């Protein structure tokens, strides 16, 4: 009982910590009160700095040459689509405002070679998928992955010789791949291989064949990350030996991304990507502050899998966490977001009347 009389009263004493206003209410004198701009949903919406819409999304789709779909165990909710199923998935996402897609193939082992020649087969699965999407959805934007790893019997992004990934020989193959994809109708090619000089070579190859309108979305700052495991499960493209640290960036380096960004811009890239996304928001901001090109962020498979796992455990609220995550990319400086949640997020946005 005695302790109650010892409670500190900020309004009491010769020099009280707080005072009362003219209405005898507790008052902390201050003119600036940032909470006024948060006082209602209408005010918050009015002053919001960043808005994410389905138009910001690129939807990655896994495809395979089978007549059935196959669940990707490490990516709950994702699957390898048959081509008819891919068209259905594109249709559903398109109706929700997601108009841009990127294709990733699971290639049969018997078609994989060190040179990755299947990558530029005009009748290969990616080329047929491009034609199917553009025929049914001519106003869609179809992006393609330019790299050899899905087609390599070595599991690497480039041609291997004596345990070394060959830079210039690989670029020769990538130019063939990019031109063949453009011929099939690709709107955007996205070199993810991280070979030095590949953006300029691909730009020249495309231009020399008359594809001056085909864009390049460069994987500019692609890190040798531990977050890619589920993606490699999806494509069955784990490295056959070693790792990818001789060509993908060191996760310890941020400044180095500016070197890659400057080179890609000089070589003709139209958009610059950072991969992974959430652990590299600082790199997204660095590129945004130092380049006038649009910046893309890849919300990669490991990030997706972590959210899914936590939500399945009941530890997180999926919708709220996903929409916050996507907003964080935008706030950090990303204009474009590649996410496996593209269709689901668009549905949530529609349900909430956000667009």
Image (tube, helix red, strand yellow):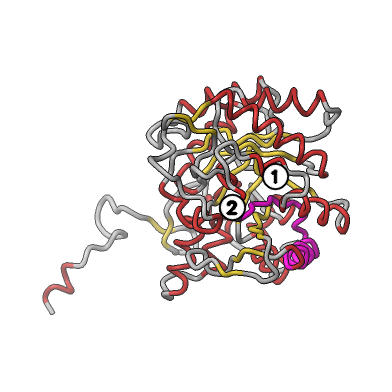
Q: Is residue 143 above or below residue 216?
A: below
Question: Is the C terminus in the top left, top right, bottom left or bottom right quadrant?
Answer: bottom right
Task: Locate residue 216, reporting x and y percent.
Answer: 71, 34
| Left or right for 205, reference 253 | right
x 78%, y 29%: residue: 206
207 drawn magenta: no
| Badge number at residue 144 | 1
| Badge number at residue 110 | 2
Between 102 and 240, the one lying in front of the other is: 240
Q: Is residue 323 above or below residue 289?
A: below
Choose top left, top right, bottom left or bottom right for residue 336. top right
Between 289 and 341, the one lying in front of the other is: 341
Cα distance, mark 2 to mark 1?
22 Å
Task: Locate residue 303, reporting x and y percent.
Answer: 48, 55
Question: Is the N terminus in the top left, top right, bottom left or bottom right quadrant?
Answer: bottom left
x 24%, y 56%: residue: 13
Q: Secondary structure at mark 1?
A: strand
Q: What range of the chain is rendered magenta?
A: 85-107
Q: Is residue 126 above or below residue 157?
A: below
Q: Earlier in the sequence, mark 2 or mark 1?
A: 2
Q: Secondary structure at mark 2?
A: helix
Task: Locate residue 121, reporting x and y percent.
Answer: 73, 43
Task: Locate residue 170, reporting x and y percent.
Answer: 58, 29
Choose top left, top right, bottom left or bottom right for residue 274. top right
């Amino acid at each position: 009982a005695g302790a109650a009389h010892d409670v500190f009263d900020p309004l009491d004493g010769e020099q009280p910590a707080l005072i009362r206003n003219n209405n005898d209410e507790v008052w902390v004198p201050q003119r600036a009160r940032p909470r006024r701009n948060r006082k209602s949903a209408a005010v918050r919406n009015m002053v919001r700095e960043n808005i994410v819409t389905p138009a910001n999304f690129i939807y990655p789709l896994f495809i395979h040459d089978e007549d059935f779909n196959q669940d990707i165990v490490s990516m709950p909710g994702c699957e390898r689509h048959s081509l008819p199923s891919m068209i259905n998935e594109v249709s559903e996402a398109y109706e929700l405002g997601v108009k841009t897609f990127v294709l990733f193939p699971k290639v049969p082992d018997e078609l994989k070679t060190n040179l990755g020649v299947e990558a530029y087969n005009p009748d290969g699965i990616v080329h047929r998928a491009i034609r199917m999407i553009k025929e049914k959805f001519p106003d869609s934007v179809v992006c393609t992955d330019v790299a050899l790893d899905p087609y390599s019997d070595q599991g690497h992004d480039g041609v291997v010789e004596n345990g070394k990934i060959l830079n210039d020989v690989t670029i020769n193959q990538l130019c063939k791949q990019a031109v063949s994809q453009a011929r099939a109708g690709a709107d955007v090619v996205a070199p993810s291989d991280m070979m030095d000089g590949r953006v300029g070579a691909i730009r020249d190859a495309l231009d020399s064949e008359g594809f001056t309108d085909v864009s390049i979305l460069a994987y500019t700052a692609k890190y040798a990350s531990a977050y890619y495991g589920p993606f490699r499960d999806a494509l069955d493209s784990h490295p056959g030996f070693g790792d990818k640290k001789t060509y993908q960036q060191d996760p310890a380096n941020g400044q180095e991304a500016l070197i890659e960004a400057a080179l890609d811009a000089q070589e003709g890239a139209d958009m610059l990507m950072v991969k992974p996304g959430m652990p590299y928001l600082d790199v997204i901001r660095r590129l945004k502050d130092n380049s006038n090109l649009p910046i893309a962020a890849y919300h990669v498979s490991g990030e997706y899998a972590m959210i899914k796992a936590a939500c399945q455990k009941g530890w997180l609220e999926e919708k709220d966490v996903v929409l916050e995550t996507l907003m964080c990319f935008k706030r950090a400086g990303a204009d474009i977001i590649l996410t496996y949640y593209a269709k689901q997020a668009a549905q949530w946005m529609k349900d909430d009347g956000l667009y």
